[in-house]
Image: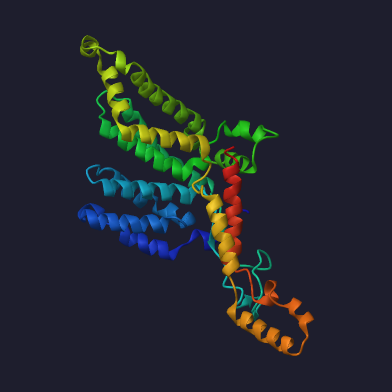
Amino acid sequence: LSGNGDCVTDKNPGFDALMSVLAEDLEHRSNKSAIYRLRCLAGAVRFAGRAVIKHREKIISAVEYALSKPGDKHLFKTGCKLLRHSLSSQCEIYPISQCSHPMRSIVGEGLRIEGMGKSAQLHGGALIHWHVPSSEQIDFTAQLLNKFSLQRLKEMGDPLSSIVQWRRCLRVLRYSLRGCSGLLLDDAPEATMSEATEISTHEKATASLILEASTETKSTLNGLRRKLSRIMVDIMSLIANDTSYSDQKSDEMDQQMDENNARKITISSDTKICKEVLEVTSLLLTRRGSFHRVQTAKSVWRGQKEILTDFVLASGSDYASAAFFRQRNLGANSYYRDGENGGKTMSSALLVNRVNIMLHTQSRNASF
C-alpha cells in the first residue's frame, strides 16, 4: 500500500456538505438535537480520509462543545465517540472507495466489457483507493490528543479536582486510546527504526510516519505509551495502598489524615474510577489499533464468502447439470458447482475487506 495523494482520496463532497449542516450552531440547539447531529457527524467522519483536515476547526469545536457539558452524560459520551472516530480516521489505514461489482461490468481502456461471473482483482485497473495517513494528519491527531486527553490528565493532579473530574478525564483518555493506540510505540521512533529484528512491519511503518511529522508531534507521541502506563501504575498504587491498610485504621488516624490520604479512600471506593483505570491499562498493554475484533471479522467474512453466489449462473449450472444427468453424462458434473463456473464469485467489496482484515491482524500481532 502507498499513500494516495490524488483528488479521489483528498476530496469528499458528501462529507463537506454534511459538515456545513451538522457542525453549525450546536450551542443554540437542544441537547437531543445536538446529540443526534454529533452522532451523525461521528459516523460520517469514520472513513472520510484527508477530507477531515480542512474541517479541523469545526471538528475541534464540536468535540469541545460536547465535552464541556458534563451534566448531560449522553452528550458527553457522544463527544467521546466523535473524538475516537476522528482520531482513528486520521491515523488508520482503511479502504475509501472501490470499483463496481465485478459481476456487472469491467471497465477497460475505453471499453465496457461485461464481467459476468468474474471475480474481482486488486490489479488490472481496479478502482480501489486506500487511505494512508500523511504527516499532516498525524499532526492533527497529536493536536486532538494533546488538547482533549493530555491536558485533562493534568487536572487529575490538582488537589481541588473532584471525583467526577477524575471519571471524565479517564473516560476521555479511554476513548482516545481506542482511536489512536496504533500510534503509541514502546520506544522512540528512531530506536524502533534501528531495530533489526523482533519489530513488526506495522511498528516500523508507524515509526516512519511519526518521523515525518512536526517537532511538536514527535515530542507529544515520543514515549507516550510508557508515560501513560506509569500514570496508571501510580493510580493503581493509590487504590491498592488504601485497600491494604483500610482495616487497620482507627478513628484517631482518620482525623489526622491529610487531603491526599482522604483522596485515596475516595478513589479506592469509587467503582467507576477503578473500572476506567483497568480498561485504560488493558488498552495500553494490548492494543495497537482502533480495530481489535479480528477473529470475529474473519468468521463473518467466511460466512459472507460461503453465501456469495451469483444466482443467474447458479440456475444455469443447475439446468446444464440436469441436462447432462438426463443424458447419463455424469462425468460432466465435475465442471459445475465449483468456483466461478458454479456461480460463485468474489466481489471487490469482499476482496478489499479481506485485505483490510489482514492489515488489522498485522497490527494486532504487533501487541504480542
Could you tell me how many numbered marks the image carries? Answer: 0
Could you tell whether 144 is left or right of 28 in the image?
A: right
Could you tell whether 106 is left or right of 266 in the image?
A: right
Quadrant in the rendering for residue 357 = bottom right
Front in this rendered view, residue 244 or 176: 244
Q: Residue at x 25, y 54 (%)?
A: 26
Where does the image place residue 157, in percent across and percent down from the top left? Answer: 33, 25
Q: Residue at x 52, y 38 (%)?
A: 286
Quadrant in the rendering for residue 340 = bottom right
Q: Is residue 144 visible?
A: no
Q: Residue at x 35, y 46 (%)?
A: 80
Q: How has the structure been colored for display?
A: rainbow
Against 112, residue 355 (above or below) is above
Where does the image place residue 179, in percent across and percent down from the top left? Answer: 45, 45
Quadrant where the N terminus is found in the figure: bottom right
Could you tell whether 122 is left or right of 232 in the image?
A: right
Front in this rendered view, residue 339 or 69: 339
Quadrant where the C terminus is found in the figure: top right
Front in this rendered view, residue 288 or 99: 288
Quadrant in the rendering for residue 281 = top left
Q: Residue at x 41, y 65 (%)?
A: 14
Q: Is residue 342 visible?
A: yes
Against 277, residue 104 (above or below) is below
Against 274, residue 77 (above or below) is below
Where does the image place residue 12, in percent across and percent down from the top left? Answer: 46, 62
